[in-house]
Amino acid sequence: MIEVIDSARCTSCDICVNVCPTNVFDKTSGVPVIARQGDCQTCFLCELYCPEDALYVSPFADQAQAIDLIALRQTDAMGSYRRAVGWTDGTRDRRGDDRSYLLFGH
Amino acid sequence: MTIQPNRAERVYAPTGSVEFEADVLVLGGGPAGTWAAVCAAERGARVVLADKGFCGTSGATAAAGTGVWYVDPNPALREAAMANREKLGGHLQDRRWMARVLDRTYQQSNRLAECGYPYPIDDSGKSQRNSLQGPEYMRLMRKRTKQTGVTILDHSPALELLVDDDGAVAGASGVRRQKDDRWTVRAKAVVIATGGCAFLSKTLGSNVLTGDGYLMAAEAGAEFSGMEFSNPYAISAAFGSVTKTLFYGWATFTHDDGSVVPGAASKGGRSAIARALLEGPVYARLDKADDEVQRQMRVSQPNFFLPFDRTGIDPFKDRFPITLRLEGTVRGTGGLRIVDDSCATSVAGLYAAGDAATRELICGGFTGGGSHNAAWAISSGTWAGQGAADYARQLGTIGGRKLSRSGTIAYRSRSRRAFEPAALAKAVQREVFPYELNYFREASRLEGALARLDAAWHDVSEADAASKADLLRAREGAAMLATARWMYRSALARQESRGMHRRDDFPEQDDRQRHYVTAGGLDEVWTSVRPHADAAYAEAAE
Ligand SMILES: Cc1cc2nc3c(=O)[nH]c(=O)nc-3n(C[C@H](O)[C@H](O)[C@H](O)COP(=O)(O)OP(=O)(O)OC[C@H]3O[C@@H](n4cnc5c(N)ncnc54)[C@H](O)[C@@H]3O)c2cc1C
Ligand code: SF4
Ligand code: SF4
């Protein structure tokens, strides 16, 4: 489930509010809030669309997890999905990396 | 020459609501809905597309990504592609439909390439087109939808259809949940592309898929086919949502004590996993993947690894607990019955595409790992969009039709009993999640579940209208409840095992039941059978 919006990184662009399919976030006059965490479907798509790598979705789908943001910032978890699919400036060449055709039919 | 797209017209509406006039209204903005919208607009129709979530991220494909039944137009390859799944699907497929889906999917995938989808190039220099990355694909489809002049309403779940005096579907209405108001679109034709129903199981990307389109269509009189094929369960880490199962083909499944679960496999042995889960925890380790395969896996499905990387699990070395999450009709094959090549339903003005429509014509009673669903979404979306546009054009100008709203449950004030959507959703889940009810079916257990579901339907029928804040959840709960009743009624009607439908009391496939089960009804759910095309032709020739 979505656990954190890092207010130090967030620019209040509200993209996450728009793209979350289950309407988890609410706009505010500043950083959006996680208004309905229980509705999160753990799809990780808000992370993909956040231009600032300011969001973190914990992989636990059914339970909220306590998150230590300071420690989390030390890891490379935030933004890792975006980089893996080639949605950051430095990783664009990964968009055509799909090797599924070698794996189908196993 | 650039063609000026026709746009839907926003018309005057009282405060608290917005209204549009369109030729075609598409409900749902996954692959089926976006293909439908684009293809209707390309025929000159003024189109509105309304999505419950955000068109581009919402639905099963956007979050999960899909293999696609893309087969080169080489007769031998096409023949093999059709033949090799017929047994799994219980021989309910229809060759003519399979062939036209293969053709259409091939064409439309190639169009995606022209539009800039970054298909990978293999070592021989060939562009490989049998897999689509979900976020990438659906971001592109949103862009194409906008470029063709379609008006997109995001965060705008449709909640009920509008019908004219003759019962033809003529629009829909819903809420704009981020604006806290209502929307209404009057249209000459409506395409239901709201996906399947996964009962809020948190299978990847699917909590927006609660069968809303089924309920709305049924309220307008539509019928279903193949709703007994509605019990696929997908593997994920026990704690996680990523129900992508391809890589479990390289897994070893073990009991708590480390012993191997006999017969367990992702493909062809999933029921052994379900039976083991009834006894206790089951673990997986992808220990059959060598280094090269591991590398290919990482670049092919990056989201598969998120749950592991973020918990410090090495899925190739460590064993981790798994579960099976119900996917209902998302990777089941039942859905709205379509009556002709344009994916029209049995109700005038109403079309169906993607998971909302039955996929029996190309998958029979089984899908999974076959990429047929994605091919169906593309093809049926194309046909439904074109069919709806043609129907709208034929209708011509039809000013002054008197339209009425067709919503039932959660709209009617029947008593002072409050509507409790959360409790309703839980009650439905209690009947459809358990493996012993839904994975492994048997008459008396199905009848017990149906009696409780029918009672729940009666109960919500008597409830008060839902409050404005609860309306969406109330309609979702009612849709899940209705879906469960069509599923189990159809499951009782099929007294054999075929495709994914597995009856403990009828473990064998029965040649005399190579037919389709039709279902419908709200207060009274009914079923009947229709012959398979082969049988129908044989009869006609007699
Ligand atoms: C984990 C996973 C993996 C899969 N892998 C494969 C695969 O490899 N190959 C394959 O062929 N298939 C696969 N599938 C199935 C495939 O994803 C679906 O068949 C496909 O997404 C169907 O497209 P669709 O447009 O019909 O539905 P969806 O993509 O689910 O889209 C439905 C849309 O309707 C919207 N909606 C719902 N209710 C309403 C409402 N009331 N009003 C307005 N909008 C509404 C939703 O928000 C959503 O955007 C997979 C499914 C899952 C869950
Ligand atoms: S998308 Fe990222 S930067 Fe934009 S508002 Fe959301 S968290 Fe902040
Ligand atoms: S993970 Fe998905 S459902 Fe959860 S907040 Fe992010 S976008 Fe929304």
Image (cartoon, grey):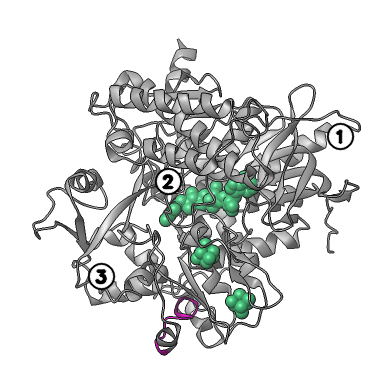
- Residue at the spot of label 1: B396
Residue A10 numbered tag? none
Would you call the spot at circle 1 few (<14 residues within 10 Å), some (14-19), or many (20 or more)? Answer: few
Q: Label 1 to label 2, Cα distance in Å?
A: 38 Å
Viewer-nearest of labels 1 and 2?
2
A90 relative to B39, above or below: below
Mark 2 residue CB less than 8 A from any atom of ligand 1:
yes
Residue A24: x %, y % from top left:
57, 62
Which chain is indicated by disc 2? B
- Labels 1 and 2 within one chain: yes
Q: Position of residue B110 (x, y in %)?
A: 57, 60
The disc labelled 1 sits on which kind of residue? Gly
Q: Magenta residues, as a range? A: A74-82
Helix, strand or loop at mark 3: loop
Q: Are marks 1 and 2 in contact (CB under 8 Å)?
A: no
Number of the label disc, if any, that sits on residue B315: 3
Given residues B32 and B536, the one toward you in this image is B32
Q: Closer to the N terminus: mark 1 or mark 2?
A: 2
Q: Is B164 situated left or right of A51 in this image?
A: right
* Amino acid at circle 2: Arg
